[in-house]
Each structure stands twice: as structure tokens, then as C-alpha cells.
Image (cartoon, rainbow, N blue to C red):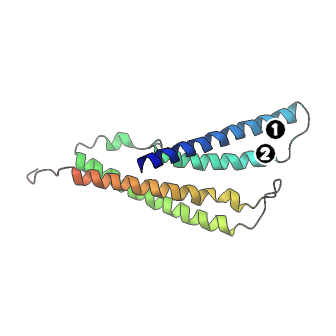
Amino acid sequence: MKRLLELGTSLYRGVLTVMTMALFVIVGVSVFTRYCLNSSLGWSDELSRFIFIWVTFLGAAYAYGLDEHIGLDFVVDRIKSDRARTVVRLFGEVAIGCVILVITWHGWEVAFSATNLSPALDIPMTWVYIVVPLTGCLMVVQNILKIGKWIGMLLATPSAPAGR
């Protein structure tokens, strides 16, 4: 299972890398054609915007999996009791999970209610919006794993003696 997870993470990182490189190439070619050839590519702005949206959401899910998002660790780290600190982190993950579920649910509604086509590329906007529920589902799985980790740590942490 761990090997499969590592393979999926490597593939995910590769997709993000390719999409980011494509974004740089498209924007670079667009700038070159606009300022050096005095002719702009009509599709490049729209495609780069769509790729940027996808890279942003996929990158957010990747960062969440690695615990790289900004947090208030300096507050939680000041809690002296290991058990209390674990409980606070567990409740934090539960709250994050609730937010992720709301974003995923409404992202799904928006993605599948979109009936319009993009103006330059003429692709269904559902393909652009689907990144929200897709990354939401990835983050829900990560959130469940994190909640399980904190519950496991909570069960493994001995409670304080009754006289304190």
C-alpha cells in the first residue's frame, strides 16, 4: 500500500511539473508573439488561465498532503500537554474536513451545472471547474488519513493522572 501511495505521489508531482512547464511555455510564447511579432495568440491567455487554475488547485491538494499550508502551529505548540495538543490538532483536522466537504459539494454543483463553452478554446467550462471537486476528493481522503493519525496518537498518548 505504501509503495502504491509513493507511486501515486510521484505521478501527481510529475503531472504538476508538466502542467507548470506548459504554463511557462505558453505564457512565454504568448509574450514573444505579442511583443516581437506584433500578433497575439487568441487562445494562449485562456489556456494559460485554465492551466493556472488547475495547477493552483492541484498544488493546494499536494501541499495539504505534505502539511505545507500555513497554520497556527506556534499557538498549538505552546500547549504543554501532549494529549491536549493532540486533541486540538484532531479538532482542527475535523474542522478542515468540514470546510473541504462544503467546497467539494458546491464545486461539484458548479462544475456540473455549467453549460457554457469557453470563448477562445470552445471547451466546456465543466472541464475547467471539475478541478474543484476533484481536488476536494483528494483532500477528503488526505483529511481522513490525518484524522486517523491523530486519533491513533490520541489513543496511544497516556492520559494525565486524576489528581492534576
Find out whether the residues at labels 2 and 1 contact each other: C-beta distance under 8 Å. Answer: yes
Q: Quickly name the residue at label 2.
A: 45
Residue 25 vs residue 160: left or right?
Answer: right
Q: Taking 18 as reference, is 164 above or below it?
A: below
**Residue 79 placement: quadrant:** top left
Query: Picture coordinates of residue 115 (x, y %)?
Result: 74, 68
Q: Secondary structure at mark 1?
A: helix
Q: What residue is at 86 percent from the left and 35 percent from the top?
A: 33
Query: Picture coordinates of residue 69 (x, y %)?
Result: 48, 43
Considering every residue shown, the one lying at the far right of the view is 38
Q: Taking 83 as reference, is 136 above or below it?
A: below
Residue 10 vs residue 79: left or right?
Answer: right
Q: Secondary structure at mark 2?
A: helix
Alpha-carbon neighbours of circle 1 within 10 Å: few (<14), some, or many (≥20)? many
Gap in angstroms between the C-alphas marked 2 and 1: 8 Å
Q: Quickly name the residue at label 1.
A: 30
Front residue (pair 61, 103):
61
Amino acid type assigned to the residue bearing label 1 in the image: Ser
Front residue (pair 45, 25):
25
Amino acid type assigned to the residue bearing label 2 in the image: Asp
Query: Picture coordinates of residue 17 (x, y %)?
Result: 62, 39
Per the rendering, the mark at residue 55 is: none
Considering every residue shown, the one lying at the far left of the view is 163
Alpha-carbon neighbours of circle 2 within 10 Å: few (<14), some, or many (≥20)? some
Residue 117 vs residue 58: left or right?
Answer: right
Query: Picture coordinates of residue 40 (x, y %)?
Result: 87, 40
Q: What residue is at 56 percent from the left and 46 percent from the top?
A: 12
Q: What residue is at 81 percent from the left and 38 percent from the top?
A: 30
Query: N-terminal of the two: label 2 or label 1?
Result: 1
